[in-house]
Image: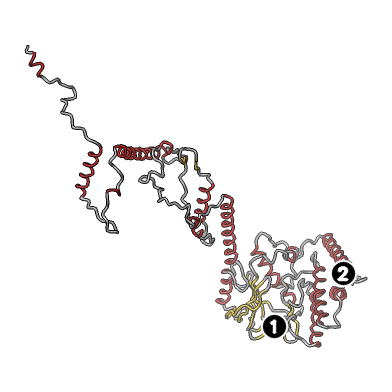
């Protein structure tokens, strides 16, 4: 075999023939060729800057060194690695509330990764800026900072402070939190929780006030339910029209209206609507006037405020009816509709009669008024079997030369556990008023009490404490006597006939 032929054959390689070796070149030539081809493909035309100068070569990073190009390539590789790491982290955590961070395995620091970091902002050196306090600082990312020496967690004081400040925007609109004046505010957890609790309390208080305003009778306004009742009276023809408010008290609001007609009885030309307030703010200390009254004791309910208000209106209706039959000068009852009591108007031409406190009377008229008041008190106690329990110059009107008695919703019978105490208080108010007005015939409070009640309690040295002790002892004996007789409750007297109710009542 020809050896020369064997030597001429080219040895075969399993991976194919080996081509000629390419000439060696530097990374600069490679990058330059790639850059040139890219510019040719995209047809990028370098434009001049606003100043009119062309972009110079020194505006680009120095790419003459292979080391620089290698570092740039390594940086690009690290970024791609970090992107892949983020995707793996997102896939690993999924929708779990507890997440695991791969930040420790990142190759590029967040602040150096200007292309991939979403929280990156332009850095400014504000160490020498006098207005740096007015610029809010960015909250750093949580995790390791630098070489692992400084760690920022969600419990960091500055991080929590800035986050609490931002969460104040979620407060209610009526809570003015301001805009911080551009300052870097940091609220501690204690302060933020206090503000949040205060905001919640204010919202609840505002809701309660709105609820009370919508469902209660105010000073000179009525709630929707009361307004509807008044409209029904006008539509039924009981009232022609309602003119306006003429008086405001602790427990009620009085309106003036023009009377209409009723089938059962005539309606006066001018009537007064006494609307009892539907809030119990003024009745908290006045429940003893009704809960111990045998006429309403079984029906008294502390748990339903509206029922208590209706009992007050019904009680005044019964007391006025009893007083009118005894000949006491008082308004006539026309109609009772829930907590609205329609009465005859004491006055003329929309002008209410003045109170005894406000009217200026001559000495003779004042003396006449005193004797009338004394007679009214005796009639109340002896004929009507009632004690006014709130008698004063504010609840007595002067009209057509006579004293008229109003506001008897709290009146009780003498058998009430505190009936005699209420009577003594009424006597003290009356005696004090007329003595100050110069009525020389005015009896003292002790003589007036005996003249009205006829009990002849010994005055002695006119010691009020001793006199009150005698009154309390009398009340105790009366209560024991009633219990021995077994009369814990008493029926309503047959003389207390009720006036007609509205036929289309909602009750």
Category of crowding for the residue at label 1, using alpha-carbon neighbours closer than 10 angstroms: few (below 14), some (14–19), many (at least 20): some
| Location of residue 122 in the rendering, given as x and y in whole percent from the top left corner | 40, 51
Q: Which residue is mark 1?
A: 353
Relative horizontal placement of residue 41, taking residue 303 as reference (left or right) = left
| Location of residue 455 in the rendering, given as x and y in whole percent from the top left corner | 88, 71
Q: What residue lies at 31% left-to-right and 37% top-to-bottom?
A: 67
Which one is in front, 180 or 55?
55
Which one is in front, 261 or 213?
213
Category of crowding for the residue at label 2, using alpha-carbon neighbours closer than 10 angstroms: few (below 14), some (14–19), many (at least 20): few
Question: Residue most toward the left?
Answer: 2
Mark seen at residue 464: 2
Q: How many marks?
A: 2
| Image position of 108 with respect to 434: above or below | above
| Quarter where residue 299 is shown | bottom right
Which one is in front, 503 or 444?
444
| Location of residue 464 in the rendering, given as x and y in whole percent from the top left corner | 87, 69
């Amino acid at each position: 075999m020809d050896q020369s032929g064997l030597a001429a054959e080219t040895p075969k390689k399993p991976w194919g023939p080996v081509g000629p070796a390419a000439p060696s070149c530097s990374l600069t030539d490679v990058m330059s060729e790639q850059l040139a081809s890219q510019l040719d493909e995209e047809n990028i035309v370098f434009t001049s800057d606003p100043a009119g100068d062309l972009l110079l070569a020194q505006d680009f990073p120095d790419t003459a060194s292979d080391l620089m190009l290698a570092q740039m390539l390594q940086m690009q590789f690290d970024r791609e690695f970090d992107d892949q790491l983020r995707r793996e982290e997102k896939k690993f955590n999924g929708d779990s509330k507890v997440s695991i961070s791969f930040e420790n395995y990142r190759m590029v620091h967040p602040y150096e990764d200007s292309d991939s970091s979403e929280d990156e902002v332009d850095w400014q050196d504000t160490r020498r800026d006098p207005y740096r306090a007015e610029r809010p600082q960015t909250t750093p990312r949580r995790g390791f900072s630098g070489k692992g020496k400084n760690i920022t967690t969600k419990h960091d004081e500055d991080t929590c402070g800035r986050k609490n400040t931002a969460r104040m925007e979620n407060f209610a609109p009526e809570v003015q939190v301001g805009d911080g004046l551009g300052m870097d505010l940091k609220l501690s957890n204690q302060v933020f929780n206090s503000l949040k609790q205060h905001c919640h309390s204010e919202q609840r208080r505002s809701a309660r006030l709105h609820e009370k305003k919508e469902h209660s009778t105010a000073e000179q306004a009525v709630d929707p339910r009361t307004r509807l009742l008044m409209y029904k009276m006008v539509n039924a023809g009981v009232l022609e029209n309602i003119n306006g408010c003429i008086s405001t008290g602790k427990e009620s609001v009085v309106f003036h209206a023009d009377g209409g007609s009723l089938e059962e009885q005539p309606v006066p030309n001018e009537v007064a609507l006494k609307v009892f307030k539907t809030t119990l703010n003024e009745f908290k200390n006045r429940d003893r006037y009704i809960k111990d009254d045998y006429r309403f004791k079984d029906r008294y309910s502390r748990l339903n405020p509206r029922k208590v208000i209706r009992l007050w209106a019904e009680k005044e209706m019964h007391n006025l009816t009893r007083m009118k039959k005894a000949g006491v000068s008082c308004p006539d009852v026309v109609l009772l509709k829930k907590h609205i009591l329609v009465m005859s108007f004491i006055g003329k031409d929309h002008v209410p009669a003045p109170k005894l406190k406000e009217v200026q009377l001559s000495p003779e008229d004042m003396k006449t008024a005193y004797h009338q008041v004394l007679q009214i008190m005796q009639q109340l106690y002896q004929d009507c079997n009632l004690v006014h329990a709130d008698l004063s110059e504010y609840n007595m009107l002067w009209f057509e030369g006579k004293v008229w008695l109003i506001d008897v919703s709290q009146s009780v019978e003498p058998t009430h556990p505190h009936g005699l105490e209420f009577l003594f208080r009424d006597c003290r108010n009356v005696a004090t008023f007329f003595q100050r007005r110069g009525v020389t015939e005015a009896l003292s409070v002790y003589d007036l009490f005996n003249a009205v009640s006829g009990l002849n309690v010994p005055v002695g040295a006119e010691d009020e404490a001793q006199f009150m002790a005698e009154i309390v002892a009398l009340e105790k004996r009366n209560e024991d006597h009633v219990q021995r007789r077994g009369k814990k409750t008493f029926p309503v007297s047959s003389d207390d006939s009720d006036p007609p109710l509205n036929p289309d009542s909602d009750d």
